[in-house]
Image (spheres, rainbow, N blue to C red):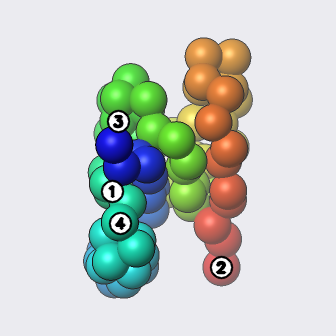
Amino acid sequence: MKDRLLIADDEADIVTMLTSFFEGKGYEVMTASDGIETLKQVEKKPDLILLDISMPGLNGLEVCSSIRDHIDCPILFLTA
């Protein structure tokens, strides 16, 4: 079974680059482009989340706060 990675970022170029890289390394990649979509994808229980801080809707810090009590996978923040 492949490790599942969630990439949450509103910059399409960054998502495309990271998706290509991690799929090439054998990861199953899920993506989200805003905070609400990220919350929906988290229900699929990723093994690792790459989370942008500044996204539309809920920002990355709000998403992290919302999910931290329900999921225990590592969360790495992406920021410019």
Residue 26 numbered tag: 4
Q: Amino acid at mark 2?
A: Ala
Which sits in the foreground, 2 or 19?
Answer: 2
Q: Residues within 10 Å of mark 1 (few under 14, many from 20)?
A: many
Asked if residue 31 shows in the view, the reply is no
The amino acid type of the residue labelled 3 equals Gln
Residue under label 2: 80
- Mark 2 and mark 4 lie on one chain; the one further toward the N terminus is 4
Q: Secondary structure at mark 2?
A: loop
Q: CA distance from mark 2 to mark 4?
A: 26 Å
Foreground mark, 1 or 4? Answer: 4
Q: Give the label on residue 38, or none.
A: none
Horizontal and vertical percent position of residue 60: 60, 48
User: Viewer-proximal residue, 54 or 23?
Assistant: 23
Disc on res. 41: 3
Q: Nearer the viewer, mark 3 or mark 4?
A: 4
So how many labels did they put on this image? 4
Between the residue at mark 3 and the residue at mark 4, the CA separation in whole angstroms equals: 19 Å
Mark pair 3, 2: CA separation: 23 Å
Q: Earlier in the sequence, mark 3 or mark 2?
A: 3
The crowd level at tag 2 (other Cα within 10 Å; few <14, some 14-19, many 20+) is few
